[in-house]
Amino acid sequence: MRIIKSLKDDEYPKAALYHARIAARGVCVNAKGEIALTHLLADDQFGHRDYYELPGGGKRVGETVLESAIREMEEEVGVKVKLLNKIGIIHDFYNLIKQENYSYYYLFKVVKEGKRHFEEREARLINKIVWVPLETAINLYKEQLKIKGVGLLVARRELPILELVAKSFDKSA
């Protein structure tokens, strides 16, 4: 998978040493053609969180990145999925927590709905899961670019992914 974009964190002061994190994320499409977004609403070291993010999370030891993405769709969205395509990688930084991220993005089709089962951290951060048309998600991220903090960093990371997916949908239509 290729790196689509490399982004810097200009929202928080630069840190001296960083640890690397591999994350697996998904653009998860249901039968209506809508995609799943997690709505985060919490207060933590990043300040007040009130923004949208594609479902996903960190790769566990012993998992492939794809296996991690599939597991995250089950945990956060409560769905079984089928891989449609590998989208790409976004490389970015979170200075506040001294983290360098490699986020691997996949396009999934929902094949079965089930029940979400959040981990403790996810239960604290995730307010709800919403299903929206792709164009609505793109517009939500464009609005999110106007806020400060980690929500802005997330929008910068994920908007290019959604725009790539939209282009691929346009070509296949």
Image: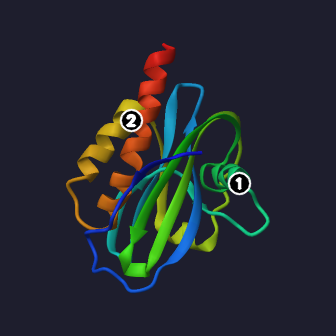
- SS for callout 2: helix
- Mark 1 residue type: Arg
The reply to whether residue 84 is in sight is yes
The residue at the point 76 percent across, 60 percent down is 63
Tell me if 151 is positioned left or right of 132 in this view. Answer: left
The residue at the point 33 percent across, 53 percent down is 156
Q: Residue furthest right?
A: 62
Q: Residue furthest front?
A: 2
x, y (%) of residue 75? 66, 56
- SS for callout 1: helix
27 vs 150: above or below:
above
In this view, the residue in front, 136 or 84, is 84
52 vs 10: above or below:
above
Q: Which residue is mark 2?
A: 163
x, y (%) of residue 86? 61, 39
8 vs 135: above or below:
below
The residue at the point 61 percent across, 73 percent down is 120
- The colour style of the image is rainbow
The residue at the point 74 percent across, 56 percent down is 64
Q: Nearer the viewer, mark 1 or mark 2?
A: 2
Q: Please give the label number shown on residue 3.
A: none
Q: Which residue is mark 1?
A: 71
The reply to whether discs 1 and 2 touch (Cβ–Cβ < 8 Å) is: no
x, y (%) of residue 47? 32, 76
Mark 1 → mark 2, Cα distance in angstroms: 24 Å
Q: Earlier in the sequence, mark 1 or mark 2?
A: 1
Tell me if 19 is positioned left or right of 134 in this view. Answer: right
- Mark 2 residue type: Glu
